Image: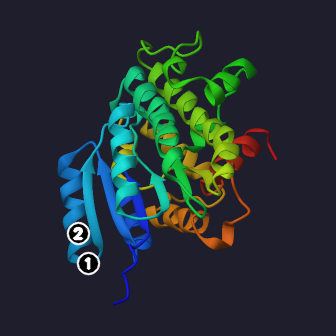
Amino acid sequence: MAQTTAPKVLIVIGAGGMGLPIARRLGIGRHVLLADYSTTTLNIALETLHNEGHTVSSRPVDISSYSTVTALAQEASSLGPIDAIVHTAGVAPADSTARQIFEIDLLGTANIIDAFLPVVSPGTSMVCIASMAGGMIPVPPNLEHHLATAQRDQLLKHKDIDAEAQGEGAGMAYAVAKRGNQLRVQAAAVAYGRKGARINSVSPGVISTGLAQAQLSGPGGDLVRGMIDMSAMRRIGTPEDIVNAVAFLVSRESDFITGVDLLVDGGAVAGRKWTATGV
């Protein structure tokens, strides 16, 4: 009797506005393991994918805790060969403190990168969702080096990382954290490459998810709308725009691409930079 081969595994961390459509697109023919901090979000996504015919399981996770992320990685490896890991989880400045942003968006991403390294294998592709905000502020070289290379337990210990910042400090924390995501991915590429795996990041612009809608209706909504109006495409992005980018980065067509950040912002950064100069 022929032995059945375990299906390849897709891990999607963050099962909400970006995670669910990514799981739906990439989950065909794979065992999908969903992870999220919110059991409500997790259960909704689990039921949706199950009803659509996907092979899917789920696990709650707090990405700010390395031990729980490690447990997630171990469970994923027990299901079969890991084909792709897509990390979409995070918080936004509209409804989070600077400390939450640093612990979840910055340290959480470092936890995921480190925890999954032991269980990846040739052909595995990881994609971390960062943000165009990571390229919108000047970051001193010594802070860039720290964000890229510091040990996890030292990552939040730097004079330019102010976890107690108030007011507009949350927005600055978000930009620093997302720059950290881009740099952390770049710095991890060699270690992943030694195992035949790849790691990249995608930096979305303003995408129509629940987090973006909260920003649009919050105190900084006019700033966000102005950024959209100034962009090359002059529209808000859709989750499908991000799904398309992620699908490319986990496909065989991108086998020679690793350690890079793919900006998917409808030309918002370009518009902000060059419109401001009068070009």
The reply to whether discs 1 and 2 touch (Cβ–Cβ < 8 Å) is yes
Q: Position of residue 108 (x, y in %)?
A: 43, 34
State the SS at label 2: helix
Say whether residue 42 is visible: yes
State the SS at label 1: loop
Question: Which residue is at a point 37% across and 70% down the rendered structure image?
Answer: 24
The residue beneath circle 1 is 52
The residue beneath circle 2 is 48
Question: Which residue is at a point 73% across and 41% down the rendered structure image?
Answer: 273
The quarter holding residue 18 reads bottom left
Q: Position of residue 226 (x, y in %)?
A: 54, 44
User: Neighbour class for label 2 at 10 Å: few (<14), some, many (≥20)?
Assistant: some
Q: How many marks?
A: 2
Q: Amino acid at mark 1?
A: Glu
Question: Which residue is at a point 48% across and 46% down the rendered structure image?
Answer: 116
Q: Position of residue 82 (x, y in %)?
A: 47, 61
Above or below for 116 versus 187: below
Query: How far apart in space, not on screen, are marks 1 and 2 (Cα)?
Result: 6 Å
Q: Amino acid at mark 2?
A: Thr
Image quadrant for the N terminus? bottom left
- Which residue lies most toward the top here? 159
